[in-house]
Amino acid sequence: MSPNESIAGRPANYRPILISSGVRSSAHRTPNKVALAQGAREFTYTTLIERFNRVATAAIHDLGLKKGDHAALFAPNCIEFLEIVAGLSDAGVAPAMVPPSVTPPEVAHICNDSGAKVLFVHESVEAVARAANLETVERIIVIGKDYDDWIAAAKPQTPTVPIEEWDVFCIPYTSGTTGKPKGCLLSHRSRTMAFYTMGVEFGCYGPDDRALALAPLFHGAGFAFAMAPIFFGGFCEILPKYDPEIVLRKISEMNLSNTFFVPTHFHRMFALEKKTLDKHRPNSLKAIISNAAPLLQATKEKIVDYFGEGLLHETYGSTEGGFVTSLRPPDQLRKQQCVGMPYATVEVSLRDDDGAEVKQGDVGELFCRSPLLFNGYWENPKATSESLTDDGWCTVGDMGRHDDEGYLYLVDRKTDMIISGGVNVFPREIEEVLMMHPAIAEASVIGIPDEEWGEAVKAIVVKSAEVSDAELETHCRQSLAKYKIPKTFVSLDVLPRNAGGKILKTELRVRAREGTL
C-alpha cells in the first residue's frame, strides 16, 4: 500500500495526533531552539526528538517491549521524565506513573497491578524500588546511573509502530472506591486536546512563551503544564524541587510567561519576607494557573495584590475528566468559592440520583463530557462503568451547583477523597493502617480546610488502650507515604453513625470546621 492510499476508509492524509507530534513539528521549524532545561542541562528540539527516538528504539529492540505492553516510571521531577513518557508511548508502551514519595508496598501495587515489565527509577528513590516486591518487572533501569548508557546505545530512529490517537500513552494512578489506587488510562487524544484547550483558555502556550514546571510530573495536571509549552514550540524549565524564592527569581530573571501552582505553593511563597517578595516581583507573566485544590479567598486576594490583576486562573478537573471548568481572572474576586464555567469543548451536567438534571441552585452530581476524558480504569470494568456512562459522560463523584449566571460551585465530594497538597488521598487506606494498631478500635479519616495544603488529613480514632499521637504517626509512617500521614489526631469515645451503622463523615467534617472536634 502506498503512503497516499487511505486506511480503513480514512482520508489518505490522515495522521493521528500523538503526545510527541507537536514537539516533532517544532523540531522541524526551530531545530536549534532550546526546548527543555533543568538547571545547566539544556536540550534543543533536535536533541529532544533524538532522545525520544532513542527511548522508543531501545524499548523495542533492547527491552523487547511491544505495543500494548506497560512499563512504570518512578521519579521526582527531572528532565528525563518527559522523554521517557513520550519515547515509550511512541513505541506503543504506556508507563504507569508512580508518585516519588510512596513506600515499597505502594510501588509494588502500581507496578504489579499495571503489569509493568520494566521499571524506570530515579537514583534518589532506587532503594525504595529495590525493597518492593515486584512480580512483573523484568528489568530496572536507573536514571542517573545506567539510563544514560542505555539511551546512548540506541539508534535515534523514528519509530514506525502504528499508534492511534485514542491509544493509551500513560497510566497515572488515582485512588478509588476500594481505597487501592486505580490505573487511569489516558489516551494521546485526551491530553493533546487538553493542550489545545489550555492554549485557548490561558493564551500563553505559543512558540514565544516560556514556562516553569514546578508541580509533580507524575500528576496529570503537572505533566500537562510541563508538556504543553514544548508541544507548541515554546520553552519549559523543569524544577526538581519547589523553593518559593528560586521560583520567583526564575520567573523574573528568565522572563517567563506562565506557570502552574497548587495552593501549597502560594502558601509557602507568601510566607517569605516582604523584602524578598518585593525584590523578585515578576512582571512578565501572562497567566498564573492554579489547580488540584480550592484556593482560599484570602489567598486569591494575596495573589492578585502581588502579581497583579488579569493573571490568575483557577481550574477544576480530574485525572479522569481532564480539564472541566475555569474561573477566569475577571471573576476571581467577584465569585467566591467558585470553579467557574466549562472550558471550550466541555459540557457539564448536574444530576440527581435518578440521572435527571437538577434545577439551578440545587446540588447534583457533576458529570462532564468532552474530548479530554480518560479511556477507563485499567482492568477494572466495575469502576469504569461507575465513572463513564454509555453516552459518553464522566463523573468522579463530585457534587456541585450552578448560580444564576451558570457558574459552577463544588459543594462536597460524593466520595470521601481528600486532596492534600494537590495529591489525592483516599481515607480508607489510612483507616486500614490505623486499625492495624492494637490500641485502635475504630478510625475515621477526613479532610479539613487548610491554608497550606488545601486540605489536611485528620484522623478521628476510638482507642482500646492508651497510645500517643506520636506513636500513631510512627505507626503510619511504616506503611504510608508522607503526604497520607494524618496531620492531626482526635480521640472520641464513639464515632457518630446513622441508623444503618455507617460512620457520619459529614458530621465529623462539620464538627472539625466548627472547632468542636
Image: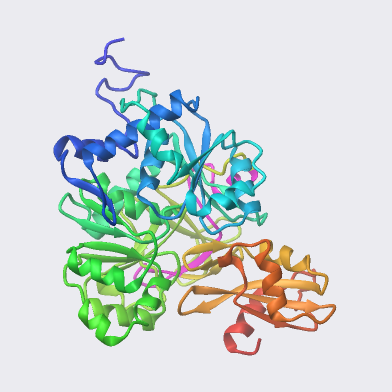
Identify the residue at horizontal 37%, vertical 28% (top origin). 154
Locate residue 158 relative to residue 115 in the image: left or right. left
User: What residue occupies the far right of the structure in this picture?
Assistant: 464
Residue 362 location (% of width, % of height): 50, 70
Name which quarter of the figure residue 487 lies in: bottom right
Locate residue 385 relative to residue 499 in the image: left or right. left
| Magenta stretch: includes residue 394 | yes
In this rendering, is residue 399 above or below 25?
below
| Magenta stretch: includes residue 311 | no
Locate residue 376 relative to residue 234 in the image: left or right. right
Q: Is residue 397 visible?
A: yes
Q: Nearer the viewer, residue 103 or 317?
A: 103
In this rendering, is residue 188 above or below 458?
above
Give the position of the C terminus as an image quadrant: bottom right
In this rendering, is residue 364 above or below 86?
below
Q: Is residue 305 visible?
A: no
Residue 142 location (% of width, % of height): 48, 43
Name which quarter of the figure residue 88 lies in: top left
Residue range corresponding to the magenta coloring: 382-409
Q: How is the image coloured?
A: rainbow
